[in-house]
Amino acid sequence: MPMERDFDKQYLSMNHFLADIEGRAFRMAQIATGNRDDALEIVQDTMMKLVQKYSHHPATEWKALFYSILNTRILDWHRRQSVRNRFRSWLNWHDDDDESIEDALAQHPDDTSQTPDAKLQDNQFMVSLNVALSALPLRQQQVFLLRVWEGMDINEAASIMQCSASSVKTHYARALEKLREKLGDHQ
Amino acid sequence: MTTKPTMEPTQLESKIKSSLDASVTSLDQDTQQALAAIREISLKKQQHRTWFNFNAWRPASAFALSALLAILFVYQPNSLDDALQRVASQQNISHEQPEHLTMLELITNTEDLETATDPDFYVWIDEVLATEGMKNAV
């Protein structure tokens, strides 16, 4: 039946798209939140919304829609955290066992396919990169990752971030400058 | 005074990109499985949504509507009344003879075919007509 064939085709396309993007999306969310579980939850929300609301859109639009949802979810997470932190400081809570901020080392995946020296260098760079990216203001972080990692041009990033092209340029330039300052000696 | 060696932006960008790519390919098993499970759950939502999607039901709805229109066109409710009027005029039965019209309606009603084929029914009609005839005579 043609309708079922269309559905199967769309199902496979969406599955392929999500399988391709899920790892990067998870890492972006993890860098933004510093927490694995929160990152997984954000990715799940993003996938659900994309599938439920936009799966009938052309496949060429999925990437922009996905990152638009992802960035909104990350922004929401930061807002909630901000309110929670304000509430905590207001009540003067001290949570020594707080697991929400993981050590940058814990974010770094284990790679066993390299020589010890190269692995050590890469580990050091990865740890420094995680720290540097996490320290960036959220908008700069998102713009930088979309431009460098996803290879999006200024207009695509502006559309996803719902801001002007000049804002994207500014965020990107500032992010790059900060990263260059922090990572410049990792050659 | 010593200066730190710094990378050019493009070199730095490519190093960051490759490092981030490596971090994805070497994600731990638990995370990879969690992501695959999340994807599967999300795709199930797509399946459910499609069955309730109007587009999926459009051909069936169009067929049902066409069938309904065809039935209404072939079996118009007034067509039975028209047939009754035609038979009544052929039999010279006027509206002033309501009992005759009632009988005719009973006979021509397709839903009461069982009644019309029952011999007792005709015996009963004769009796009714005879009684009505006597009343009219009086």
Image (cartoon, grey):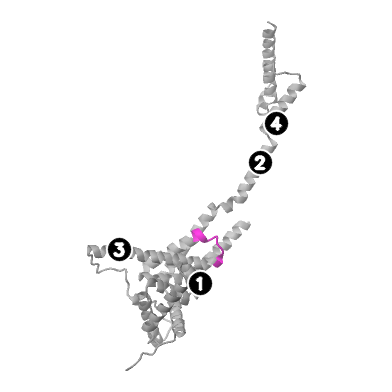
Q: Farthest residue to the bottom: give it.
A: B1
- Which of discs 1 and 2 lies nearer the camera? The answer is 1
Q: Residue at x 68, y 34 (%)?
A: B76
Which of label 3 and label 2 is nearer to you? Answer: 3
Quadrant of image for the N terminus of chain A: bottom right
B112 vs A111: above or below: above
Q: Point out the stretch of residues depicted in magenta.
A: A51-60
**Mark 4 — residue?**
B79
Q: Amino acid at mark 2?
A: Leu
Task: Give x and y (percent) for residue B26.
Answer: 43, 76
Q: Which mark is residue B69?
A: 2
Residue A27 percent location from the top left of the image: 42, 72
Q: Which residue is mark 1?
A: A155
The label nearer to you, 4 versus 3, is: 3
Instruction: From this view, report whether residue B22 is shown above or below residue B101.
Output: below
| Picture coordinates of residue A22, whole percent (x, y) | 46, 69
> Is A17 or A79 nearer to us in this picture?
A79
- Residue indicated by mark 3: A84
Q: Chain of mark 1?
A: A
Q: Which mark is residue B26?
A: none
Residue type at numbered disc 1: Asn
